[in-house]
Image (cartoon, rainbow, N blue to C red):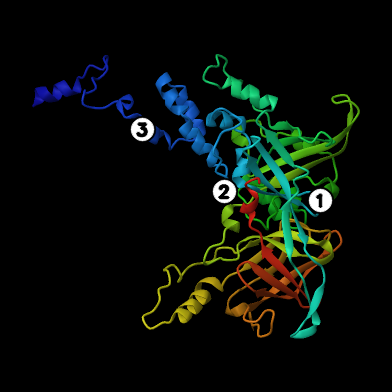
Amino acid sequence: MANHASSIGTIDTSTPLAIPHHRPRLFELPTELIDAILSYLTPVELVGLSLVCRTLRAHAENDLHWHRHVLANLPRNEIKSPYPCETWRALFVAHNQYWFLTRHKIWFCDRSLTGQMIIVRYDGRRGCIEGYQLLATRFRDGSEPWLADPTVHIHYFEPKIKLHLDKPILQFNVDRLENLMRISLSSPDSTTRPARRFFPEHPMSYSQGSDPRFSTFVLAKPIEEHERDTLLDTGDIFPYNMVWPPPTIPAADRVFGHPSDIAGGPTHDLISSPRWRPVKRSEVSDTTFRIRQWMELGPPTIGFHIGEECVTYSTLDPSLYTPTPERPWRGIWVGDYSVHGCEFLLINQPDIDEEGYKEPLVKLENESDTEFQSRFLAQKVYRGRLEAIKLTGDPNVPRGEYTFLADDLGEEGLVGIAQEPPFQGARIVRSRGHIAGIGFTDDKYIESQLILLSHNRLAQYWVDFGHISFFERVEIDQFLVPS
């Protein structure tokens, strides 16, 4: 035993250990199994794997993987071909820096007091990532008296939602010179390794020849957590130390905004300062970006800019606008704001303490369907807070502000059940409506009541104003596939 132990302890480490013949090596696995393993890798990991050897490069460049990664960035838009590129890998490379735009799809900005909301999608016919402003108009104006109280007027609201397709906000084509060079240098037949340079600002060219705008797309750098918290704590008055998105909207990343008509000052510092500008890919936020835009007098490169502005965009966590059985009003909505027209808002139902409600409700033995539904609504749905936050605003109450709040949808906030048409049977809860003077001056909350007509339509009774306005859910996914 002693000799045996001694022989184990004196293994010759100068020669490699022999691998038993019965142990399969990676390349002895079936091709399908290797590809299945590689399906768990990210695009960056696939690229790293392709540098190991020719065999792994062949697997890593299998279009099966790149097809999956392209579609992962195109919600509700399952394109069938990589056209105008020859392969899915080439298509992914062409838009490598911009896929986060289509993946998040919804973007809203700090432009002026009114803001702007855009939808970013992919057009497979042109190989183009494009972003258009979302617009809403009323089908008809006017109002009618409320039968329950003729002094109160109910405003008509039949909104028409569309994209402003005549004027893209952002546009990236596959056939841009920059993309053609990148695709060429990254092709399997290329003998030149692409330059590993990082550019935080990218010029955009719009397809409309008559468009006088010059625009650049600018990547953004998140504010450090400790600095962000300090800025928000000391910026409780609009515009909150220029932090975007504002504190009303939950967000993983926040950056510095710069609406020139609110704070004044040049946009150059916002673009060039290392405090705001990423200098490497690891510093880039994939939930915010900026667009710098201007008009140029004189020939390009020797003319001068006029009307330059820099607008900061942010997206929303899908959990904020995705309804659930317990939070059925979460979503993107459009509301009627009288002379200000239609405005878009986020209706957020924050998570609440689930203590005592963790177990799913089960129908009792002698309980009818109606009784069970009533108990479910009381314990799971009609409780907690509802927040309506403007994604676009007006000169009185700007984007990023609460437009109304219902502090409790449950018994503590209950006003009653409407008995008269057109709201008969609807639950009515107490709410607070946000109003202000021009330029968001002297803002305050006034008494109002929220009428829960359905999960897709709400009404707000502005008690002091004597009128009732409506809000409707917007189905964003209808705009993601170009017609």
* Residue type, label 1: Ser
* Residue type, label 3: Glu
Is 134 drawn above or below residue 430 in the view shown? above
Q: Which mark is residue 32?
A: 3
Judge by depth and name the residue closer to the eye, 229 or 341. 341
Tell me what residue is drawn at x 73 percent, y 62 percent: 159
Judge by depth and name the residue closer to the eye, 364 or 175. 175
**For residue 219, what is the image quadrant?**
top right
Q: CA distance from mark 1 to mark 3?
A: 54 Å
* Residue type, label 2: Arg
Image spot of residue 179 (x, y percent):
65, 27
- Please tell me whether mark 1 sits on a helix, a strand or a loop: loop
Is 431 drawn above or below residue 172 in the view shown? below
Judge by depth and name the residue closer to the eye, 287 or 205. 205
Q: Which mark is residue 76?
A: 2
Residue underneath mark 1: 112
Q: CA distance from mark 3 to mark 2?
A: 28 Å
- Please tell me whether mark 2 sits on a helix, a strand or a loop: loop
Image spot of residue 90 (x, y percent):
56, 28
User: For mark 3, does the 10 Å Cα neighbourhood hold few (<14), some (14 to 19), or many (20 or more) residues?
Assistant: few
Q: Is residue 196 visible?
A: no
